[in-house]
Amino acid sequence: MAKISWKPGNMVYPLPAVMVTVRGKDGKDNIITIAWTGTVCTNPPMLYISVRKERYSYHLLKEAGEFVVNLTTDRLVRATDYCGVRSGEKVDKFGETRLTKEEAKKINCAMIGESPVNIECRIRQVIPLGSHDMFLADVVNVNVDDQYMEENGRFDLSLSSPLVYSHGEYYKIGKKIGSFGFSVKKKKRKRKS
């Protein structure tokens, strides 16, 4: 098997396919599907989304200064795709997708009720990068669906069949094959009776 040199590009795939909600100054809520997103910092908790300037939501995000990242699942794949290919300037995406609108707790924005995790964010900085601008944001609150909570208080997102995006296609995440540190974890010895 040989490696070939390919054109420079972002090959960090798969990525989470998320639906970002934002409320305009007129009170109208919009949803934009984003794949350019990720964690930036743990303490303080921060994330980013990258958006093209020509997208309708770009100016809403700049005006509002806040947004919600709504994680998606295999059951939300149709709505996720729809919100990425239709403009909120022309359609009411909540109405068209029949998604449930819930109010965020710490910011003035709608959340998607069907999402297993809603991450409320305040924009810290907008960084012009080229084709996209990066919205660097502080996480101010996280809402989780209690149906994915285990008895020990651990949240198990895998139960929701999270959705990821790779080269124009959507996939649901498969089974767990390890956990952090498993490769160096010492095996427990059996006690002799």
Image (tube, grey):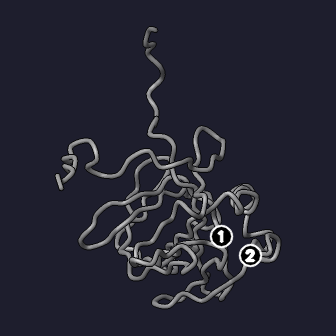
Label 2: how many Cα within 10 Å (few below 14, some 14–19, many 20+): some
Question: Is residue 10 or residue 111 the one in the foreground?
Answer: 111
Q: How many marks?
A: 2
Q: Residue at x 65, y 79 (%)?
A: 113
Tell me: residue 162, above or below residue 59.
Answer: above
Q: Residue at x 28, y 47 (%)?
A: 182
| Residue annotated with mark 1 | 31
Q: Is residue 173 left or right of residue 84?
A: left
Marks 1 and 2 sit apart, C-alpha to C-alpha, by: 10 Å
Disc 2 marks a residue whose amino acid type is Leu
Residue 99: mark: 2
Question: Is residue 96 or residue 178 the one in the foreground?
Answer: 178
Q: Residue at x 66, y 42 (%)?
A: 169
Q: Residue 91, can we see it?
A: yes
The picture places residue 186, in percent across and down from the top left corner, at: 18, 47
Disc 1 marks a residue whose amino acid type is Ile
Question: Of label 1 and label 2, which has the lower sequence position?
Answer: 1
Label 1: how many Cα within 10 Å (few below 14, some 14–19, many 20+): many
